[in-house]
Amino acid sequence: MKDIYAKDYLAGSDFTLRKGDTHEDLGMSDRELKKALARIRKRLGKFQDTLYAHGKYAVLVCLQGMDTAGKDSLIREVFKDFNARGVVVHSFKVPTELERKHDYLWRHYIALPARGKFGVFNRTHYENVLVTRVHPEYILGEYLPDVQSVADIDDAFWRRRFEQINNFEKTLAENGTLIYKFFLNISREEQRQRLLRRLRLKEKNWKFSPGDLEERQLWDSYQECYQDAIRRTHTDVAPWYVIPSDNKRAARVIVASILLETLTAFEDIREPELPDDVKEHLHSYRNQLLAEAPGQAAPGKDNPAEDQPR
């Protein structure tokens, strides 16, 4: 197996998307990749238990990518061994009428994970500088005071929005949220094959929309916007990782490995110790429980069975 180091997938402010790899197999077969992921996600699941017990950090995982990049299946496979109460997934669709009555970050803010939990954003607040940048007319639906027409959506508008996003993430990080942003990088040819698969397999038909083909024609525009967004919002507290994703199994192993490597580096995240007055009596508590006969009711309590309705 090829060694995986988080630093090798960091984007950086000079990131160039067209030079980024889209395929990686880590020198492993599909079967080996599946086994590797099982090992890693088991350790991630144990870490989540520790994170919950520690209770001072939250983890936010942001997933972005072109249509068919594999976000849904990655979430399903990477977080499979988590306690269901320890991870919350949000898939952001077209904003609702209520959401449009608030600023564009509002719906993301209220979906953030609590301390001790993982939150996964399947598509994220970055849709507001990606889809809306390719389709600036969508901004008109936000009813912004200073935007009367598409002509008002200029470079200054996007600079402000990037600054707002960076400030949003900086605030989260300063208050205990660990942020990981992953761009699942697939090739145009791989997207074509995945769309064909949706059309070929009856059980996958529901995933297809004619709009997918319309958006595909804007591939170059999306690639340019992704590159700019990643460059402008790659920060120390909220880094971008670019993941080769033509091979879905390898992409899952890489994402899981990055999370495990970087999260376990936080040495302060550990289970809290019991108070000294409890620790010094652990032996007596154990003896008290061992002294009970199986099924024995607690002293002074009636037999619970006698309280059941007849």
Image (cartoon, helix red, strand yellow):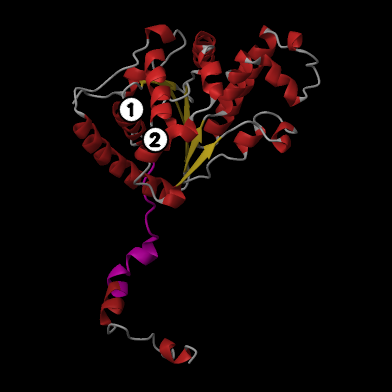
Q: Position of residue 234 (x, y in %)?
A: 49, 18
Magenta-drawn segment: 266-285
Q: Position of residue 104 (x, y in %)?
A: 67, 28
Up the image or down, 292 lies above or below 213; here it is below
Q: Position of residue 213 (x, y in %)?
A: 52, 18
Disc 1 residue crowd, few under 14, some 14–19, many 20+, Cα 10 Å = many
Disc 2 residue crowd, few under 14, some 14–19, many 20+, Cα 10 Å = few
- Look at the image and tell me in which quarter the N terminus lies: top left
Dominant secondary structure, magenta: loop
- Image point (54%, 23%), residue name: 210
Q: Amino acid at mark 1?
A: Lys
Residue topped by disc 1: 248
Name which quarter of the figure residue 102 lies in: top right
First of labels 1, 2 by sequence position: 2
Q: Secondary structure at mark 1?
A: helix
- Image point (36%, 44%), residue name: 80
Q: Is residue 178 visible?
A: no
From the viewer's perspective, is 142 left or right of 58? right
Distance CA(mark 1)–CA(mark 2): 8 Å
Which of the pair 260/203 is nearer the observer?
203
Q: Is residue 272 magenta?
A: yes
Residue topped by disc 2: 73
Q: Position of residue 68 (x, y in %)?
A: 44, 25
Q: Amino acid at mark 2?
A: Ser
Q: Are marks 1 and 2 in contact (CB under 8 Å)?
A: yes
